[in-house]
């Protein structure tokens, strides 16, 4: 009996010690938590999606997921370094430029300002540097010190593949302001970002920062950096510049919110949407590539830029399956699609790279 109690005590103390590591961040409390509890989709101690969104189908167990991940896929990562281009950070205030760095990290340069979205620069999107999938060979081509001074860092939600502790530590002193989903500010403050530098937003809220208008909208996903989920908001964002309108999708399963956004906020000059890390084991929290194309159509987007692929192996599909399928479906639907190399510039209304670089024989 005493040995069991000692084991439980040691386990609890170890858990508390681990959860105090800075990388986990901090769950919302005080006035921030009170604001979250007032949201219409906060029920029974957690935030909910607009539609019922179980993490997995009823006929799938978590053990099924674990077995699938353990089986792996020999084609889950490229065998050779991914080709990249050295980013050109020169600004032309008359243009809107987007530079993708792999997965869901990209820089938007518009109106003479730099907006960096979901920067992940660490080797692994994991709470521990020695556990989890490594980034693909060749994708470590840009570092925090390479970036110009940043006007805004925008964080869609707090998962490790979107909110990188090490990246925030390295970027916070060259960033003027952080615009984040409600609750994420708790993590940032724990990591030394001043509260006065942070604007937190929930669905339907708008702010104007310099010449830019940001609107937070619903997505279909979940959040959490430890065991307790959905204590912070997950969002998509509309970015309205002086000349263009962009939809920044973050992570989301497919649902009617894309159609709603297209009707109320569209049309969009470009939609930046996830197209990777899907599986039938979790069909509601990430989109399959064909759904990504449909979401762009629902949004009334002129161009689709597919992201959330090409850097990390977080699902069981072939590493280039997302882009092959999304390009095929976009062509079928006559939807314009940009497929830049990492580091290559997409310039709205001027340059939409479309080479099929992922088909190189040595990848």
Image (spheres, rainbow, N blue to C red):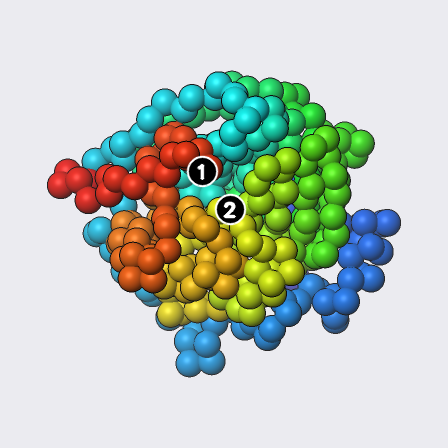
Which residue is drawn at the image coordinates 63% and 42% (left, top)? 240
Residue 97 appears in the figure: yes
Residue 45 appears in the figure: no
Residue identified by numbered label 1:
349
Side (left or right) of 113 relative to 305: right
Alpha-carbon span between mark 2 and mark 1:
8 Å
For the residues labelled 2 and 1, say whether their Cβ atoms are less than 8 Å apart. yes
Above or below, 263 against 76 in this view is below
Side (left or right) of 200 relative to 86: right
Side (left or right) of 332 relative to 362: right
Mark 2 lies on a secondary structure that is loop
List x then y, in percent, for residue 245: 58, 44
Which residue is drawn at the image coordinates 77% and 67% (left, top)? 40
Q: Nearer the viewer, residue 226 or 149?
A: 149
- Quadrant including the N terminus: bottom right
Mark 1 lies on a secondary structure that is loop
Q: Nearer the viewer, residue 158 or 101?
A: 101
List x then y, in percent, for residue 61: 43, 74
List x then y, in percent, for residue 131: 43, 43
Residue identified by numbered label 2:
269
| Sequence-earlier tag: 2 or 1 | 2
- Quadrant including the C terminus: top left
Q: Nearer the viewer, residue 278 or 88?
A: 88
Side (left or right) of 188 relative to 170: right
Furthest residue toward bottom = 59
Which residue is drawn at the image coordinates 48% and 32% (left, top)? 97
């Amino acid at each position: 009996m005493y040995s069991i109690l000692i084991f439980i005590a040691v386990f609890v103390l170890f858990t508390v010690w681990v959860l105090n590591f800075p990388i986990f961040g901090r769950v919302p409390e005080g006035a921030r938590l009170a604001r979250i509890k007032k949201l219409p989709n906060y029920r029974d101690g957690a935030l909910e999606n607009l539609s019922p969104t179980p993490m997995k189908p009823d006929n799938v167990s978590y053990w099924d997921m674990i077995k699938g991940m353990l089986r792996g896929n020999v084609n889950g990562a490229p065998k050779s370094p991914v080709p990249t281009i050295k980013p050109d950070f020169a600004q032309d205030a008359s243009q809107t430029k987007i530079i993708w760095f792999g997965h869901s990290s990209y820089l938007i340069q518009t109106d003479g300002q730099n907006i960096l979205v979901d920067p992940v620069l660490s080797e692994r999107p994991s709470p521990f540097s020695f556990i989890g999938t490594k980034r693909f060979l060749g994708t470590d081509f840009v570092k925090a010190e390479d970036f110009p001074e940043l006007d805004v860092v925008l964080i869609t939600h707090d998962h490790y593949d979107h909110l990188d502790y090490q990246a925030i530590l390295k970027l916070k002193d060259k960033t003027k302001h952080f615009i984040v989903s409600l609750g994420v500010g708790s993590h940032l403050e724990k990591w030394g970002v001043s509260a006065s530098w942070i604007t937190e937003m929930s669905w339907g809220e708008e702010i104007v920062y310099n010449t830019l208008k940001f609107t937070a909208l619903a997505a279909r996903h979940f959040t959490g950096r430890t065991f307790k989920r959905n204590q912070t908001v997950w969002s998509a964002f509309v970015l309205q510049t002086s000349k263009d309108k962009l939809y920044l999708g973050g992570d989301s399963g497919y649902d009617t919110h894309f159609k709603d956004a297209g009707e109320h906020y569209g049309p969009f000059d470009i939609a930046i949407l996830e197209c990777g890390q899907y599986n039938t084991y979790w069909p509601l929290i990430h989109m399959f590539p064909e759904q990504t194309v449909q979401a762009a159509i629902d949004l009334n987007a002129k161009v689709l830029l597919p992201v959330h692929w090409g850097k990390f192996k977080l699902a069981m599909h072939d590493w280039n399956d997302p882009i092959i399928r999304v390009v095929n479906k976009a062509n079928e639907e006559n939807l314009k699609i940009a497929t830049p190399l990492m580091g290559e510039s997409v310039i709205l209304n001027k340059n939409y790279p479309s080479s099929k670089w992922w088909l190189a024989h040595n990848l």
